[in-house]
Amino acid sequence: MLLAALFLSLGMQASAQSPPLAAACTAPLKPAIEVNLYFGRDIESGGEVSDAQWAEFMAAEVTPRFPDGLSVVNVAGQSRNSRNQTLRERTKLLIVVVFDAPTHQPKVAAIVDAYNKRFSQISVFRTEKPTCAGA
């Protein structure tokens, strides 16, 4: 919910297309897209998404779509609502680096849709940016 307010207050919408890949990467790095998804944990009807619920969501929805790797970071979300009140909530930041743009788009959309439905959310805040990456 908080992230939905942030999303709306910033007047941003995620583009249906991926951002362009990084123009030049120094070997062994390769052009990639870094996808950041911010999952607010507050549930509008009360309570929050528990650690156990998050783990189950990851196992069922995220890991099968991005089995090669990802990172999850606990962050403190903050935004302002329509009544000019500052809202804060615990948030999970999911970071995925993909090399197959734009084929990652349906996977990300499915994850966002599943989270919104499962936990009665309005939206998941999302950013994407070109980067150079490699192991």
Image (cartoon, rainbow, N blue to C red):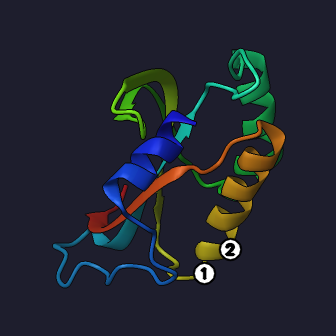
Name the outermost residue toward the front.
Answer: 83
Left or right, 130 with respect to 65, comes to left
Disc 1 element: loop
Disc 2 element: helix
Left or right, 56 with respect to 27, comes to right
In the rendered image, which quarter contains the C terminus? bottom left
Q: Which image quadrant is residue 43 in?
A: top right
Left or right, 126 with respect to 58, comes to left
- x%, y% of residue 91? 50, 28
Q: In the image, which disc is placed on residue 44?
A: none
Above or below — where is 25 with respect to 79? below
Question: Pointer 2 and pointer 1: residues touching (CB < 8 Å)?
Answer: yes
Label 1: which residue? 103
- x%, y% of residue 19? 35, 79
Left or right, 118 with respect to 127, comes to right
Above or below — where is 68 with respect to 86? below
Whether residue 35 is visible to the viewer of this picture, yes or no, is no
Residues packed near mark 1 inside 10 Å, few (<14), some (14 to 19) or many (20 plus): few
Taking the spot 70% from the left edge, 23% from the top edge, the residue there is 49
- Amino acid bearing label 2: Pro
Taking the spot 59% from the left edge, 74% from the top edge, the residue there is 105
- x%, y% of residue 45? 76, 24
Taking the spot 42% from the left edge, 21% from the top edge, the residue there is 88
Q: In the image, which disc is placed on residue 106?
A: 2
- Amino acid bearing label 1: Thr
Residues packed near mark 2 inside 10 Å, few (<14), some (14 to 19) or many (20 plus): few
